[in-house]
Amino acid sequence: MMIKRIGPLCFILCLFAACEPYDLRRFDFPKCQAPEAGIRFKQDLLEVEFSLTNPRGDIGSVGWDLGDGRTRVGNPVYHRYAKPGTYTISIVIANSCNDVFRTSRTITIQ
C-alpha cells in the first residue's frame, strides 16, 4: 500500500530534479521593433490586390479579413468579390517577439 502512494510522488520529484534550472541571464531574448503598416488596394472591377503601405518595424506574418467572410495570409493578397459593395478590410501583423498591430480600412467596390 505504501509503495502505491509514494510512486506518483517519486515520479514528480524525479521529473523536477531532472530539469535544469532556468537562468534568465543566459537566455537570448529576440529584439524586435513593433510592426505597423497601412492598407493599400488596387481594384480592377471585382478583382482587388491588397498590400501593406508604409510598413515599419519587424513584420513576420500578415493576416487579412477581407470583409466578406473570407480571409487570407501573406502580402500581397488577391481577392475577387462576388458583388459590388462597401467592405471593411482588417489586417493583423505579428512578428517573432509576439508584437501585434491591427488596423482597418473601409473600401467601396463598384
Image (cartoon, rainbow, N blue to C red):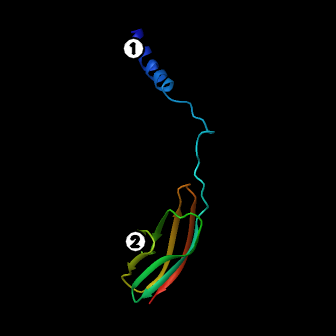
Residue receiving disc 2: 70
Report which quarter residue 34 is drawn in: bottom right
* Residue drawn 52% across the image and 80% down it: 40
Front one among 20 and 1:
20
Quadrant, the N terminus = top left
Residue 57 left/right relative to 41? right
Report which quarter residue 2 is drawn in: top left
Residue receiving disc 1: 4
List x then y, in percent, for residue 65: 46, 70
Give the class, few, some or many, for how many residues have Cα within 10 Å of label 2's Cα (few <14, many ≥20).
few
CB atoms of marks 2 and 1 within 8 Å: no
SS of the residue under disc 2: loop
Q: Residue at the right extreme?
A: 25
List x then y, in percent, for residue 24: 62, 39
Front one among 20 and 43:
20
Q: Amino acid at mark 1?
A: Lys
Q: Which mark is residue 94?
A: none
List x then y, in percent, for residue 22: 57, 34
Q: Amino acid at mark 2?
A: Arg
12 is higher (above) or lower (below) than 34: above
List x then y, in percent, for residue 58: 56, 63
* Residue drawn 48% across the image and 25% down it: 18
* Residue drawn 57% across the image and 52% down it: 30
